[in-house]
């Protein structure tokens, strides 16, 4: 019997907001239990730290060079086959709940042709933060009808998930994608909106070191952010409980991850669109058929690896997808990151280094790529895990830059881009 696939997707959640990654976090028992029973990826990263492009990569298994979705407000092309279509063609019921962000309809309903192959159940909004806030709003059903909800948004969204699981026809396995907005900030308010009481409950939790080193807005926003994460955990517990009651838990592959993290305005003027680990490192947990035993994988992984991993779990062939199944032990030595909107940038992250380049003559909203880049960041993560000391012009790291430059160009070409010219700055002695 083929496994059910349940994809639980948060928005803008840092990797270190779960207890299984960070001992200071003591309020995520349900997600931690998935990690204890399944597989936790210690070093997982987004392939594009902005909402729409990351989602396009997940729904297609292709980088932006192939989909064209290099920034927000670009609809997913209708001629690109999605993983939901692959599941549908192979006997799966396909269902979607939450934020879509791939139709460019804003606050309007997403028509069926732009739903990426989710045919059987649909309760979503293209940009959920446009149709709701922390305590109320609406989404749209399969018939494009407005469905209001009141109460904390993550709770209400989970109610729709439970409704689907309780009332679906049981003659097919399901591929259910649940896209929460939390812990993303509320755009129109400019703040994270945790449940009532979150600011008081979480005000004394330790602040991550990478945030403490900069001003940002973490002092006022981090408690509510943690409140959002705690709410997600309790709702994951509700879903798992129902799956167990239905006898579906052991045959359901559950994936928990996020599209990117948050650096709380410490690296630029907002929360994302940066190469730093606070922005690109995400939680990634899989629990279910093929992923059991409480294992921790320390090799590098990317969101681009997940589509082919899920199809591989269901024994579905999908030629042409980028990324590598997580079932394979021979992992790449780096992950590749494309950055848009804030600037046109590219980066690779190895276990030891972070290396990033920026196009000096291109606009991040208007241009998908560039022919010329300039080296922007080099961090020696073995010595500087919080990325505080940029070594990009340090003479002692000249050969390191040369090797990483070569690796980055290879990654760009493999993703479907043309090999660029990468300029370096002036080499100078390292500061001690």
Image: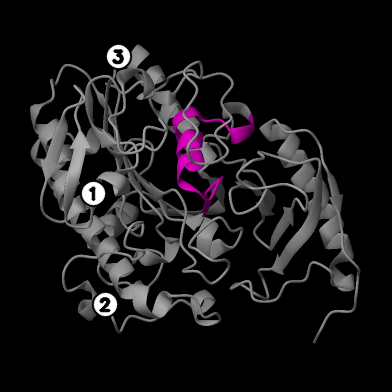
- Mark 1 or 2, closer to the camera: 1
Magenta-span inclusion, residue 55: yes
Q: Secondary structure at mark 1?
A: strand
Q: Residue at x 38, y 36 (%)?
A: 290
Element type at mark 3: loop
Q: Residue 311's spot in the image, x, y percent?
A: 43, 26
| SS for dot 2 | loop
The answer to which of 282 and 311 lies nearer the viewer is 282
| Residue at mark 1 | 132
**Residue on which disc 3 sits:** 91
Q: Nearer the viewer, residue 15 or 195?
A: 195
Q: Is residue 342 above or below residue 147?
A: below
Q: Which mark is residue 431?
A: none
Quote the CA–CA distance across marks 3 and 1: 34 Å
- Provide the residue span drawn in magenta: 44-65
Q: Nearer the viewer, mark 3 or mark 1?
A: 1
Mark closest to the chain's N terminus, 2 or 3: 3
Q: Which residue is mark 2?
A: 202
């Amino acid at each position: 019997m083929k496994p059910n696939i349940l994809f639980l997707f948060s928005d803008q959640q840092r990797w270190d907001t779960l207890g299984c990654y960070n001992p200071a976090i003591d309020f995520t028992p349900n997600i931690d239990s998935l990690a204890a029973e399944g597989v936790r990826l210690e070093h997982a990263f987004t392939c594009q730290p902005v909402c729409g492009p990351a989602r396009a990569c997940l729904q297609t298994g292709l980088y932006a060079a192939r989909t064209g979705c290099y920034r927000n407000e670009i609809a997913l092309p209708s001629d690109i086959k999605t993983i939901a279509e692959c599941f549908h063609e192979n006997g799966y019921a396909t269902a979607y709940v939450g934020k879509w962000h791939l139709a460019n309809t804003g606050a309007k309903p997403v028509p069926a042709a732009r739903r990426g192959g989710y045919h059987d159940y649909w309760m979503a909004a293209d940009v959920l933060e446009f149709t709701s806030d922390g305590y109320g709003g609406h989404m749209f059903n399969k018939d494009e009808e407005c469905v209001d909800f009141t109460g904390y948004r993550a709770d209400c969204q989970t109610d729709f998930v439970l409704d689907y699981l309780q009332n679906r026809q049981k003659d097919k396995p399901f591929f259910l994608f649940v896209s929460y907005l939390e812990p993303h900030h509320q755009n129109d308010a400019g703040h994270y909106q945790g449940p009532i009481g979150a600011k008081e409950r979480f005000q004394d939790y330790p602040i991550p070191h990478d945030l403490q080193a900069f001003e940002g807005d973490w002092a006022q926003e981090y408690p509510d952010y943690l409140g959002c994460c705690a709410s997600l955990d309790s709702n994951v517990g509700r879903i798992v409980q129902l799956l167990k009651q239905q006898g579906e838990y052991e045959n359901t592959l559950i994936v928990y991850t996020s599209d990117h993290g948050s650096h709380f305005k410490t690296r630029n003027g907002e929360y994302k669109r940066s190469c730093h680990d606070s922005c690109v490192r995400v939680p990634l947990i899989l629990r279910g058929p093929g992923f059991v035993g409480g294992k921790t994988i320390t090799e590098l992984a990317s969101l681009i690896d997940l589509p082919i991993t899920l199809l591989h779990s269901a024994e579905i062939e999908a030629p042409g997808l980028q990324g590598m199944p997580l079932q394979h032990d021979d992992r790449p030595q780096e992950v590749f990151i494309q950055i848009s909107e804030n600037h046109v940038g590219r980066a690779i992250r190895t276990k030891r280094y972070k290396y990033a380049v920026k196009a000096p003559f291109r606009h991040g909203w208007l241009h998908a790529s560039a022919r010329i880049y300039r080296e922007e960041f080099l961090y020696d993560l073995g010595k500087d895990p919080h990325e505080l000391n940029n070594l990009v012009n340090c003479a002692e790291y000249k050969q390191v830059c040369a090797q990483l430059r070569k690796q980055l160009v290879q990654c760009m070409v493999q993703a479907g881009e043309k090999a660029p010219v990468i300029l370096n700055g002036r080499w100078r002695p390292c500061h001690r």
